Amino acid sequence: MQEIEFLNPVILPAQVLEEMVWHKGLCSGCRACIAVCLADSLVYDHEANHPAQVNPCVDCRACLVACPRLSENMERTLSVDIIGPYLMIMNVRSKKSCARQQNGGAASALLAVALDEELVDCAVVMGQDRWSQEPHSRVIYDSKDLEKTAGSKYTKNDILESVKDLTRDPHVKNIALVGTPCSVQAVGLLRQSDNEYAAKLAGKVRFLLGLFCFEAFDQQAITKMERAIGQPSWRIDKMSAGEGKMTVALRDGSIQTIPLSLLAKFIKPGCAACTDFTANLSDISLGGIGSAPGMTSAIVRTQEGMGLFKIAEEMGYIEAWDGVDVEEIEKVGKIKVRKHMV
């Protein structure tokens, strides 16, 4: 992959990101630039909702390779094909039930077999503070802990920041990573790059699982939801967005719904630059659109993804059927493209 070239060699990479991404409100919050930074130059500024430089830049340029919102990188990842490349598309569900799993629990099942069969040393997923409903990245070493992280999260996706320390750990050779399209794009870009610092992170990601994603919200959306349902955040058991509404399951088993239009002002600005609905650069993409009831649509894209899928199937972790409604996936994906290319 040809590295990005800029006309002014005096401008350091962090300045390029600041001028071309952060100050334009394009940052997705994926933290890829932080994860690959050799000199620990960058930290995430939660008030500004984008990274900030705190230490001198050594001009390794890995952050420029990783950022999915630089225009040059967006041109490389942009595709008019909603589904993207694939080897097969199946309805999938876990053969082990979990109270908080959604859309068949396929992601947890695939991660479980990867850990149990020692295909990876750990998995990096989004966990959640069950009191405040604020997501946070979590490194899982034992598949028994996956149930604690099951369920969709809609307000943060900072898994790549956790990968930074794992990249430097000589005992961690292979990682399974679950992320939304922006994180998947970042890892995909790193996989394509010949930048030696980018390769250190990309080389440890054995399995990249991508999640269907229309858009994400600021954490303030949780406060709005509390007011809308008249319940504190700690009563929320799980959430699911779809068909123009946010469905909220409470701990007492009751269900409430909120029109997504009420949360529109909390959509993260960086989402407006994303047209990837199905995480095209993943090894396996997973989502609840187009699947049979209680199942996951799984788009297996690479030989690595196929290997993981077949092992999970043969070891009895998942069961799969044909019949995914591909047209429904394309329909929702096209809506995202139209909305975000306006």
Image: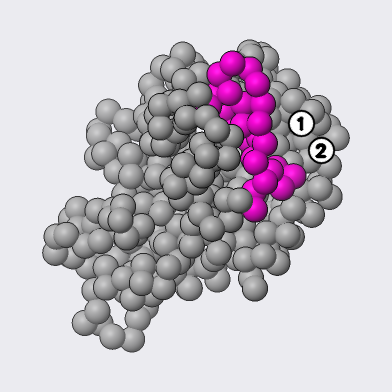
In front of the other: 191 or 330: 330
Element type at mark 1: strand
Q: How far across and down, in percent of the image, does residue 73 sit?
A: 48, 67
User: Residue 97's image quarter?
Assistant: top right
Which residue is depicted at the point 52% across and 29% down?
231
Is residue 3 shown left or right of residue 92? left
Q: Nearer the viewer, residue 283 or 146?
A: 146
| 333 is higher (above) or lower (below) than 158 | below
Estimate how packed mark 1 is, as few (under 14), some (14 to 19) or many (20 or more) residues with alpha carbons within 10 Å: many
Residue 324 numbered tag = 2
Q: Amino acid at mark 2?
A: Val
- The number of discs equals 2
Q: Which mark is residue 174?
A: none
Quadrant hosting residue 324: top right
Q: Earlier in the sequence, mark 2 or mark 1?
A: 1
The reply to whether the magenta stretch includes residue 314 is no
- What are the residue bounds of the magenta stretch? 236-261
Which image quarter holds the C terminus? bottom right
Amino acid beneath label 1: Asn
Answer whether residue 241 is magenta in the image. yes
The reply to whether discs 2 and 1 touch (Cβ–Cβ < 8 Å) is yes
**Left or right of residue 93, residue 276 in this image:** left
